Amino acid sequence: METIKIQGTEDTPKIILDADNEIMEIAGRSLPEDVASFYEPVLTWLSEYEKNPNKKTVVNFKLTYFNTASSKILLDILMKLEEMYENGNDVLIRWHYPEDDEDMEEAGEEYSDIVDVPFEQVAYSG
Amino acid sequence: MDNKKDVKGFLEFVYEFYKSMKAHEITLVYEGEITHQITKAFTSLTESNMAKDDESGSVQRKVFHVMVECLQNISKHADDFTSQNYLFSGRGIFLVSKGDNEYSVTTGNAVENDRIEELTDILETINRMDKEELKQLYKKQMKEGRLSEKGGAGLGFIDIKRKTGKELEYHFLPISDDTSFFLLTSTIPREFK
């Protein structure tokens, strides 16, 4: 399967979707000028991946900031993963947040309330 | 001679303007089109100023959040006279002030008068809500609200109130028979170190 690697910038996150090496990560800041078109390749990739997923799918979210427009699309991504989980696949979301960032921790909790998929909160320092 | 007088008058105005900015502790003021580039420039400028002032991480993050949402409220609705959006011009005034106890972020832009009632309803509803209610509303909007063509999801005001814990102060001033100037100010308390 094709790999997606997008470098992070000051307003868009780093994205790695690499099925062969089992690395899936969205990290950094998310306030793209056009959220829908920025995340469109991610959703397309997941739809493709869903047809023939790895034995275990771990997706790491390590965001330091996202705006409200991004929050809606992140939910769309999580709901795609929920769909995979409901179809009997082994899926785990790891939500990383800076240990002093309560808002980011709470955002993770909220997402885990909304979607029914194994969800792990991971605090990191610095 | 006349021209010289005009210039002098203008420069005196600039000095008055400067003094008035200082008196109101305004650190950033802008009038014009609000674009993504402007949003990036202002947030990064304010961020580096806050870092220089050793502002806590939490205050820095909250100010960043509020600035982005306020600026995007205006920029997302550029040229939107006919759509269902509340704010139509894409231009406006934006200012940030820093007092001893709080930062405030203020925007002003033109809105069509027939949006005032709706905007007031939304802001009043959000202002009345407590933390838990806001959380539920945010989740509901995220699930049910669709992104508008320009990327707005109706979440901005809710997010500002949640992040600041303060009511959104607003005011409408008449511009013409059809339009008003919509002013909105959000305050972010500075923590005591």
Image (tube, coloured by chain):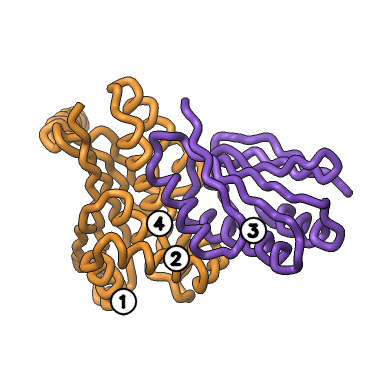
Q: Which residue position is annotated with label 2?
A: B139
Of residue A72 and residue B104, the one placed in the foreground of this image is A72
In this view, the mark in front (3 or 4): 3
Of residue A110 and residue B165, the one placed in the foreground of this image is A110
The chain letter corresponding to purple is: A
Q: Which residue position is annotated with label 3?
A: A77
Q: Of label 4 and label 1, which has the lower sequence position? A: 4
**Circles 4, 2 touching at the beta carbon (< 8 Å):** no
Q: Which residue position is annotated with label 1?
A: B118
Residue drawn at x 36%, y 52% as measured from the top left: B70
Residue drawn at x 82%, y 52% as measured from the top left: A55
Label 2 packing within 10 angstroms: few (<14), some (14-19), many (20+): many
Decide if residue B154 is on the left or right side of residue A72: left
Amino acid at pointer 2: Lys
Please provide percent x and percent y for residue A19: 82, 46
Q: Of label 2 and label 1, which has the lower sequence position? A: 1
Residue B100 position (above or below residue A102): above
| Chain B tint as drawn | orange
Task: Determine the CA span between mark 3 and mark 2.
Answer: 15 Å
Please provide percent x and percent y for residue B163: 32, 50
The lab-note entry on whether marks 3 and 2 share a chain reads no
